[in-house]
Amino acid sequence: MSKIHVSTTVNGDAVDYLCDPRETLLDCLRDRLNLTGAKEGCGTGDCGACSVTVDGRLVCSCLMLGVEAEGKKIETVEGMADGDVLHPLQKKFIEHAALQCGICTPGVLVAAKALLEKNPDPTEEETRYWLAGNLCRCTGYDKIIRAVMDTAAEMREAS
Amino acid sequence: MDYHSPASFAEASALAAKATGTTRFLAGGTDVLVQLRSDIVTPDTLIDIKKIGGVRDITRNADGSWTIGVAVTGAEMSEHPELGREWPGLVEAMDLIGSTQVQGRATLTGNLCNASPAADAVPAMVAAEVTISVTGPDGVREVPVEQIPTAPGRTSLAKGEVVSAVNVPARGANGGDAYLRFIPRTEMDIAVVGCGVNLRLDGETITEARVSLGAVAPTVLLVEDCAKAILGTTLDEAALDALAAAASAACNPINDKRGTIEFRTEVAGVLAKRAARIAYARAKGEKA
């Protein structure tokens, strides 16, 4: 079966890859582009470990085909830090120890970043609902929520 | 698997008409990809309809009705400044589906064509008297939503037919809709029972009513006995009790881990009452 050529933008860089039409965007990011930040947890859109944004919209990359990325702008966890300078969310996740095994962390960070871009001052309830599609089996969520709320407060002060 | 991304619905229909084996249309993909990845349905032909012009548009027509493109996502419906003000039940039903991530992709059309009895958006569409435009080899036909699902996972769409638009009627004066579902948790679950209600009032009296139920039968139901129970009333206690009884009587549910037959039957009546109260308040212009 012949592969399909896809031209897209990932974290600001123009990229091209060849993929089988059955491959998901997650497969393409990890196996074609070696961007292994996004994880495959469930593969069915329940766990959010594969969260990325596509044209600014938070999606599960396991629920999108690689061929659908043609002409889109994809952002992954690899694009969050500016060189060696971590994104405020990444710093706060370390400070609050808001991760244990780390499998869910890239997806949680991407999802939390999308939340704060849409709503810089979310309530705890809004944050918990927004992140309901990001499952974490280690932390019990409390530290994650505290880290996001603390980041939001700090980013509001900084702006 | 052959992947196509046609530029028109006529082309999409023609591709599907001549395809052999299993064909699937791809909009948001939140069901199609799950089925593909878990080897439940492996399409031989996958037709992505998102490159067709207008499929991402929410359009208010001159007569006050709405045309929602087949690839409009739940997130886009929720963010629309006007749609949810006129059809809050429809928008809230769509918004109940899945996570933030799923909302970024999932569509009304996909929810309908997946034909799950527990689809949240479908009872709300049925109550709102939504129709869909279907493009096929012989042209375009308009079909009421309730005529699309025929059994779990099955629709009345024929080979070569593709849903090309979702048509939401004009809200009009003194109308209101609501959708409620029961799940054992607060988020990320599948309806145990869902109920949509859409009403129009003349003063305090209900003059038009449509009541739908989800997850209590092999397909979403439009329950005429529920409408009859409240038509001509002011939604007093007797009317609400008659509504609940009619809703429970219409149920033909399954037993599963989410709810027993008895539980679903009881809850259908409870939700019908609650949804009717919300729709009634909205029809009177009250916040609900």
Image: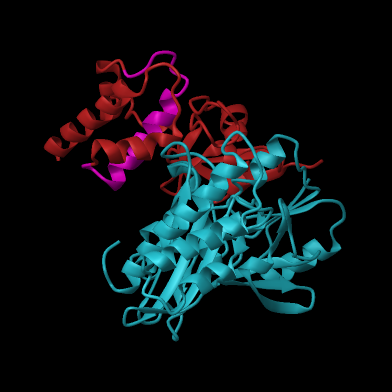
Chain colours: A red, B cyan
Where residue A44 sits: x, y (%)?
60, 35
At x 58%, y 66%, the residue is B223
Residue A95 falls in which quadrant of the image? top left
Q: Farthest residue toward the front?
A: B238
Read off the magenta span. A98-121
Q: Farthest residue toward the bottom?
A: B63
At x 45%, y 24%, the residue is A104
Asked whether A53 falls inside the magenta stretch, the response is no
- Left/right placement of residue A111 relative to residue B49 reads left
- Left/right placement of residue B154 relative to residue A92 reads right
Residue B42 falls in which quadrant of the image? top right
For the image shown, how many numbered marks are present on the structure?
0
Where residue B183 sits: x, y (%)?
48, 41
Q: Is residue A80 above or below residue B102?
A: above
Where residue B278 sits: x, y (%)?
36, 62
Q: Farthest residue toward the right?
A: B20
Asked whether A118 falls inside the magenta stretch, the response is yes
At x 24%, y 41%, the residue is A122
Where residue B142 sits: x, y (%)?
65, 77
Q: Is residue B263 above or below residue B132?
A: above
Answer yes or no: is residue B65 visible.
yes
At x 46%, y 81%, the residue is B61
Could you tell me which quadrant the C terminus of chain B lies in?
bottom left
Answer yes or no: is residue A87 visible.
no
Query: For this rendering, which residue is in front, B274 or A122?
Result: B274
Q: Is residue B115 above or below residue A87?
A: below
Query: For this rendering, which residue is in front, A51 or B251?
Result: B251
Could you tell me which quadrant the N terminus of chain B lies in?
top right
